[in-house]
Each structure stands twice: as structure tokens, then as C-alpha cells.
Image (tube, helix red, strand yellow):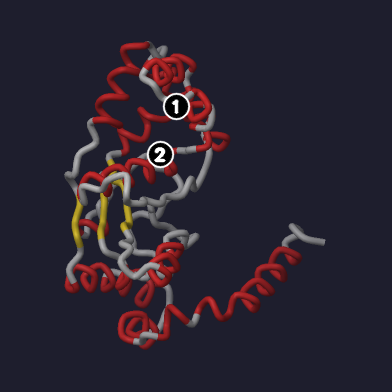
Amino acid sequence: LTTGSAGTIACGDYLKKRWPASKIAASEALQCPTLLMNGFGAHRIEGIGDKHVPWIHNVKNTDMVIAIDDEASMNLIRLFNEPVGAEYLVSQGVPSELVCQLPLLGISGVANLLSAIKFAKYYELTEKDVVAAVATDSMDLYGSRLEELRETEGPYREIDAAVDYNRYLLGESVDNMLELSYHDRKRIHNLKYYTWVEQQGRSYEEIQAQWYDDDYWTGIPANVDRIDALIDAFNRKVGLLV
């Protein structure tokens, strides 16, 4: 899963607790490879974190980092949403019922799909294995991005659909991936210090607890009711709830 402030990747912590042999992969934009190589940069995968490690990311429980080229996500949103793209996918044997649902994947949702493909190829998974990803957004949020692509790239043609299908779906490779060792994970975790302790006022003791205290992350679900109450109180204060 791509990472950000929502903490969706924590669903992997739950799955790993239920099935300890599970693996968690965090993904990000190749153009801003903060987790992969302490990198930075601009990218077009909207809705994900960049240039920092989210405070709520349990890095110690993460097994792999995957970087996704934003060019792949941007081209695939056209394949999945342009009528010519839908027709091409059906011609390649993709069930029309599935093609009709592809607009449920927004830009970061497509990045999650590509991460799942790379993960499956890296571990040479088969039909006996299960890969889970999340459709974190839909194209309802990105209609303007499609219009921009039409203006800059021109009409979407069948040859464009064929190229995108073969290059970015069938041709997705296992490059720009890192299977994390203990020290790889600690290196990523340590990046939190500069953003969250020095700049945002989090304590040294808490960032250490995230790494060394076995109860730190498992204790959070026990506070769900209290957290929900705080969310409801905030929503009432800003007028979202009455």
C-alpha cells in the first residue's frame, strides 16, 4: 500500500497478526523515493505522503518497500477510464464486469494495484497465494487530471491503449524494490526524527517507544472508542456533525 497520513497500511498489521507469515509492503512514488533511498522529489501520485515517513507508520513491521513510477499511474488512469481503453481491455479478455469497475481506482489506487503486481512477481506467487491491496480513492476525485492529460497528450487511441496495457500492466517489473532487513527498517524509522521530533514537537521517548516498546503499536486498537469520540467531537466543532 502507498503510505500517508490516513494509516491504511495498518490493515497489514492486522493481517500479519492473524496470519504471521504475511508480508507488508509499503509503496511510494519512484520520483520521490524517501523510503527506498532517503530520496526526495516531485511526483504526480496524488493522495500519498512524500518526503517524510508518516508518524503512524509501523516501520518495524514492514517487510518491503516498492517504488512506483508516476508515469505508469498516469497512463493507466487513461487506459481504465477512456472508452477506447475499456474497449481494448475487453478485447484482451478482461471481463467487461471488471472493466466497468476500474474507475473505482484513482491515481493512488492504481499505484496500489501496480505495487501488488510487483509484489506478486517478486515472490513468484501463484494462484495458491493471496495479495491484498486497497482502492484508496476513485476517479471521481480526478476528473480534472483526465482533462489535463487529454489537452497535453491528445486523444486516447487504440495504439495508446495497447502500449499502456503491455508496458505498465503486463510489463511491470521487479525493479525499484527493497526487501527490508532489520537495519533497513531502522534506517527508515530513524527518518521520522527530523520531521516529527525536531520539527513537530514529538518526544524522543515516543519515537524510541515506537521501535523498542512491543506494546506501543498493539495498544492503539484498544483506544478505538476514545479516538472515535475525539473524532466525533471534532466533527461537531467544525459543523460536519450536528
List the single residue furthest toward the front: 128
* Residue for point 25% across, 52% down: 33
Disc 1 marks a residue whose amino acid type is Phe
Q: Is residue 67 left or right of residue 227?
A: left
Query: Would you place residue 149 above or below residue 56 in this image?
Result: above
Q: Which mark is residue 110?
A: 2
Image position, residue 9 (x, y; %): 42, 60
Disc 2 marks a residue whose amino acid type is Val
Element type where label 2 sits in the image: helix
Image position, residue 78 (x, y; %): 42, 24
Nearer the observer, 58 or 187: 58
Disc on the earlier residue, 2 or 1? 1
Nearer the observer, 54 or 111: 111
* Residue for point 19% across, 44% down: 174
Q: Which mark is residue 80?
A: 1
Nearer the observer, 127 or 232: 127
Q: Is residue 172 left or right of residue 9?
A: left
Image position, residue 88 (x, y; %): 40, 16
The quarter holding residue 171 reads top left
Query: Would you place residue 57 above or below residue 222 in this image?
Result: above
Element type where label 1 sits in the image: helix
Q: What's the distance in space between the residues labelled 2 and 1, CA to CA?
A: 9 Å
Image position, residue 20 (x, y; %): 34, 70
Residue 194 makes an appearance in the image: no
